[in-house]
Amino acid sequence: MASILKTKLLNQKMRTIISLLGSLLVVLGVMLLIPIIVSFIYQEQIISSFLIPALSSLLAGLLARLKFREEKITISTGMLVCALGWIVISAIGAIPFYLELDYSYVDTLFETVSGFTTTGITVFSGLSEFPRSILFWRSLIQWLGGLGFLTFFLVVTFRGQSGLFQLFTAESHKINMSRPVPNIFKTIKILWLIYAGFTIVEIILLKILGLTFFDALIHSFTTLSTGGFSSYDASIGYFKTAGYQYYHLIEYVIIIFMAAGGINFLVHYKILTGKIEELWSGIEMKYFWGIIAGVSSLILFEHYLHFPFEWSGLEKTFRTTLFQVVSIITTTGFGTESINGAFFPALAKQLLLILMLIGGCVGSTSGGIKVIRIAILNKLFNREVKKIYYPKRAVLPVVVEGNIIPDDEIFRIVALFFSWLVLILIGGGITAILSDLPAWNAFSGIFSALGNIGPFYFSVSKMQSLSDGIKITYIIAMLAGRLEILPIFILFSPQAWRD
């Protein structure tokens, strides 16, 4: 009787969704146990702040797995699991912050979503006084979110069924990419191995340059994930003000690994297998390096229009400019100078806002629209110009690296770009109505949230004081930006919930 009732109340799709969410909760529960080790190491009495959500997540996940069995996984099922999964893990992942820190649940949820989506907007301050286990969890969620929590779930659970490919499709950036191996799950494992390897290398380099192991670990987690959470309010600028001897080398190391996080990890695979030319030969890489070089040059030029040129200060100005440009285009959000400060005059601020929209490469840990889509839109524009003076019968496809981009892909890119602009207008409008922020600042906040970037043109204290309505708007924007909008909208489609 109970089985018949369950069948009537829940269709096949709902049972599959609950089963998969249960599996995600089990993995999240295990992850929540890891900061307890940090608590023991640093003799912090906050074990219950992690143990309560960990056990709750494990129990709920195991019950869901026992009660429901996953069946056919369609693309709509994958997108629903993706959207719901990110919401659920964020809701539970926020509990340690809520139990331990003096912040409202909305604030801790905001911080957690910002972490998992690798956005890096923070409403926390006084970070250096936080328990180490809290700072560790805050950076770990960014690292897990870098390549995607669902792909991490597939790797650690060795889930190789063909149907689960839909989870990867739903969470990954929606554009056709080549793979290092035909099997999608072996591809995911290769990408995670590269990701983990780069993280270890950065930890070693930062430790050599004088950081404590804990600081090296925290900042490596949030560099490769292009998340940008730091254990200090001053971000990377802390290492200079604190008197670190090699602070300038620390900044260069972080520049390199921010760029690595912003590059397609399949490009990294090709480079590591001997194809060094892949670092600059593809159209996306050409645009990526060209944008960095062009914007950096313009900002340097404008800077010296406003400040006197001194040879002795050239290296510092160059390093500060390059650091911020790479930080913004990769959507990491680390800073050595405030983007709202005098170092970056009006044009620089405008250029950095544009970089927030563009973001890094497809297949990277970066947010934004992605460089390859900007390249395709540019080619689309050039094609439309050519149509004016070419014969009407001329066939003018959009070609990228010898491949014709299908019309469906072009329509998808145009639709995504349009939806970004609409969400920016809506989010900016809500921010303006519910706050006293000027228009420029209001738009910078939603640019940062939707682009999963972090920096914005007002203070952290002002962000803390914004209404819950604005914070919830930004939470939705961060999730929409990370999942590239479609999975979030699928939640509100009745048809998507039917078998």
Image (tube, rainbow, N blue to C red):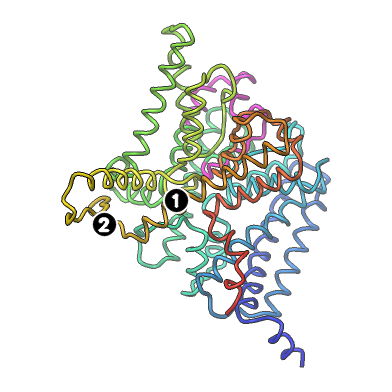
Residues drawn in magenta: 224-253
Q: Is residue 218 left or right of residue 47?
A: left
Verify whether residue 239 appears in magenta: yes
Quadrant where the N terminus is found in the figure: bottom right
Q: Quadrant of residue 63?
A: bottom right
SS under mark 1: helix
Quadrant where the C terminus is found in the figure: bottom right
Q: Quadrant of residue 51?
A: bottom right
User: Which circle marks residue 194 in the picture?
Assistant: 1
- Against 179, residue 466 (above or below) is above
- Against 13, residue 385 (above or below) is above
Q: CA distance from mark 2 to mark 1?
A: 30 Å
Verify whether residue 420 appears in magenta: no
Q: Of residues 170 and 272, which is closer to you in this image?
A: 170
x then y, percent, for residue 364:
45, 48
Q: Residue at x 54, y 65 (%)?
A: 154
Pointer 1: residues within 10 angstroms few (<14), some, or many (20+)? some
Instruction: Say which label, 2 or 1, has the lower sequence index.
Output: 1
User: Which circle marks residue 59 in the picture?
Assistant: none
Q: Is residue 374 left or right of residue 41?
A: left
x then y, percent, for residue 93:
71, 53
Q: Of residues 141 and 198, which is closer to you in this image?
A: 141
x then y, percent, for residue 79:
55, 65
Mark 1: amino acid: Ile
Q: Quadrant of residue 437?
A: top right
SS under mark 2: strand
Mark 2 highlights which residue? 404
Mark 2: amino acid: Ile
Q: Residue at x 73, y 63 (%)?
A: 57
Q: Residue at x 67, y 36 (%)?
A: 432
